[in-house]
Image: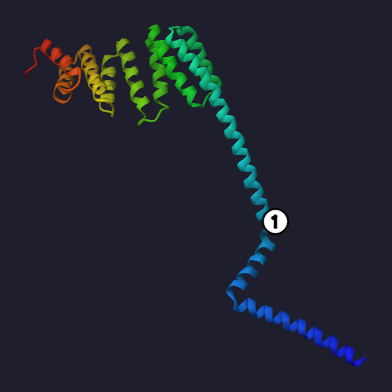
Amino acid sequence: MPGAGRGYTECMGGRVAGLEFRKRRQQEDPLVRTWSELQTGFDRYGRALGIAVVLVIVAAGAFYFWNRARQAREAEASVQLAEARGLYWRGDYATVLQQTRDIETQYAGTRSAAEATRVRGDALYWQGDFKAAISAYEEYVSRVDLNSPAHSQVQENLAQALENDGQFERAAQIYEEVAAAEGPRDILASRWIHAGRAWHLAGNREKSIAAYHHVVENYADTPSFRDAQLRLGEAGVLNS
């Protein structure tokens, strides 16, 4: 059947012409060419991309559950820390010491565990165990941000413990460090008074007088101004 053979040939020729037309469109049209390249790339790298997506999802899920567990630990630790603080204000220092050590051990790495170290230092201080308090305060300040208000507050506690332990020179140096930090003027002035006292106890009269003069010259608007005047008067150098 000659007619049928010619029809088949014409049909195949049409398909070939159509394929050639689409190839030309892909070469000439940037959008068509880009889409074609994307399809080819997906066919080639689709499996690897799928694995990468799965890995990302697994990692995100693991982080979610880790974060939930961390928050739960922090919440548990904060409850126990609140209990320890309540006992501290009631003067039950022996129980506070045991509870804060438990928090530091069981919830290591949490913010509450770090704060437990600070509370432990306070309890040791009021028990009169100044050397142990010094150790606790030093441990705390080694962890906290230098620019944090808590850093200078606990540094001042450390200086007080050092002063009570007879380490007057080091106490005076720390008092001056925290007096140079940012904070309310009345607190900064009182730290200079503490520094002057510690320098006096260390036998350094010159630095003691300098600390009191600093208050008189820079903190006349604070309650420590009158205190500094009295101490300079006792030293006989009020007008020097």
Residue 167 position in % (x across, y down): 30, 14
Q: Is residue 28 left or right of residue 114?
A: right
Residue 71, placed above or below residue 133 = below
Residue at 89%, 91% in the rendered image = 3
**Outermost residue, left direction?**
239
Residue at 77%, 84% in the rendered image = 14
Q: Is residue 131 left or right of residue 38?
A: left
Kind of residue at badge 1: Arg
- At mark 1, the secondary structure is helix
Is the residue marked by circle 1 packed among few (<14), some (14-19), or many (20+) residues within 10 Å?
Answer: few
- In the rendered image, which quarter is residue 233 located in? top left
Q: Is residue 24 left or right of residue 104?
A: right
Residue 151, placed above or below residue 159 = below
- In the rendered image, which quarter is residue 119 located in? top left
Q: Circle 1 sits on which residue?
A: 47
Quadrant of the drawing holding the N terminus:
bottom right
Quadrant of the drawing holding the C terminus:
top left
Q: Is residue 53 left or right of residue 172?
A: right
Total numbered badges shown on the rendered structure: 1
Colouring scheme applied when the structure was drawn: rainbow
Residue 21, placed above or below residue 87 = below
Residue 63 position in % (x across, y down): 59, 38
Residue 85 position in % (x across, y down): 45, 15
Residue at 46%, 7% in the rendered image = 92
Residue 6 position in % (x across, y down): 85, 90
- In the rendered image, which quarter is residue 140 located in? top left
Q: In the depicted view, which residue is nearer to us: 69 or 211?
A: 69
**Outermost residue, bottom direction?**
2
**Outermost residue, right direction?**
1
